Image: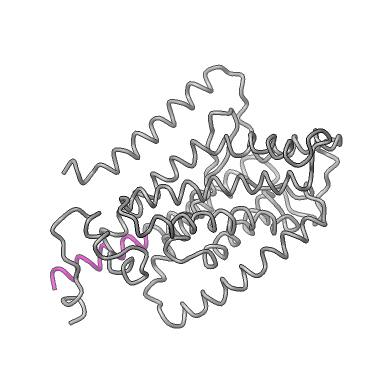
Amino acid sequence: MIQNRKLELITLVAVLGFIIVFLMVSAGGTHEFAGSDNVGSEKIAELTGHSVDSFAPLIPQWQPPSGEIEACLFALQASFGGLVLGLVFGYWLGQRKSSSTA
Amino acid sequence: MHIMEGFLPWQWCVVWWIVAIPFLVMGIIELRSMMRKDREYLPLLGVCGAFIFILSALKLPSVTGSCSHPTGTGLSTMCFGVFITSIIGAIVLLFQSLVLAHGGLSVLGANMVSMAIGGPIAGYVLYRLLKNTSLNIYLTVFIVSAVADLVTYVITSFELALAYPAQVGGVVASFTAFFVIFAITQIPLAIVEGCVLALVFKYVIELKPEMIIKLKVFSEEQIAKARGDSYSLPKTEVKS
């Protein structure tokens, strides 16, 4: 049994380790945890000597009006993935159950 | 790993679009032939795609004090190859550039080359190298997923470095700067992603080992060994 659950344990340890590292890093309060995309954009601004605002989109694009709406859309994206995942694994489980009783 | 809309000169946008298009065309051809012939693989494609959707929506904090998201392309790369993965990746990136303003249509080519094409290629090369060794297959899945994730960010750094060479030190110096921002942040995320995808792969071969064998992702012996039980594959009983 323990042998069978080895991978689950390793994953759990990795996730817990990740959380602990995050708590330790964030405890200092010196980091703002901005997206690396934005940090990258700031670096571009620094290298070119232009301000971040001077980079206008080449193709006009819709911006989520607020962080909440952005979070909502990201959640939508993830939940869509989760839905498909649950559907397929449920389908496979059901398929196996019905084939073993038949 | 998104390059933001407007942050890449249009010449480079064109270059990366040109690089990306052949992969998309190949991907569509492969997907169409799969839809026509082997529809039984569609649920597995759904699982692989679902993970790209979920993982690339999660922005996780990292040791460097900034946030970034994993890519989830490793699983799909191993099961379906680079071309089909590039299509799923492109769909996610298109969604994010249209409704989330992460990336954009002009930089979509560059973002596809890093996340949907470059990362998967690196993962695929490693997968081919490790496939026929005696390495534990979960470890192979872990390595392939983590590397596909990490290389995505290395390529983003490279794309930005080419477009914005530093005044002192040129492309190399600016690659180092972007590498620190993107790739170092990504290392812990890549490790977690590798573990999670290895775990998912374990559940896939618990439920549908015959599918993985048919796709020749791993051999029958490797899978029987990884399942670690006296399981014999249901070749005859299911068919009859």
Magenta span covers which residues?
A: A87-102
Q: Position of residue B104 (x, y in %)?
A: 72, 54
Q: Quadrant of residue B193?
A: top left
Q: Position of residue B210 (x, y in %)?
A: 28, 69
Q: Quadrant of residue A20?
A: top left
Q: Residue furthest top?
A: A28
**Scheme of image coloration:** one colour
Identify the image quadrant of the C terminus of chain A.
Answer: bottom left
Q: Main secondary structure of the magenta part?
A: helix
Q: How many marks?
A: 0
**Image vertical order of residue B225 relative to residue B43, above or below:** above
Q: Position of residue B218 (x, y in %)?
A: 33, 63
Looking at the image, which is closer to me, B136 or A44?
B136
Residue A92 on the magenta span? yes
Looking at the image, which is closer to me, B63 or B151?
B151
Identify the image quadrant of the N terminus of chain A.
Answer: top left
Q: Position of residue A27 (x, y in %)?
A: 52, 18
The residue lying at 70 percent from left, 40 percent from top is B175
**In this rendering, position of residue B210 left or right of residue A1:** right
**Image vertical order of residue B168 relative to residue B218, above or below:** above
Looking at the image, which is closer to me, B23 or A76?
B23
**Image vertical order of residue B157 relative to residue B205, above or below:** above
**In this rendering, position of residue A62 left or right of residue B142:** right
Residue B238 on the magenta span? no
The residue lying at 51 percent from left, 54 percent from top is B53
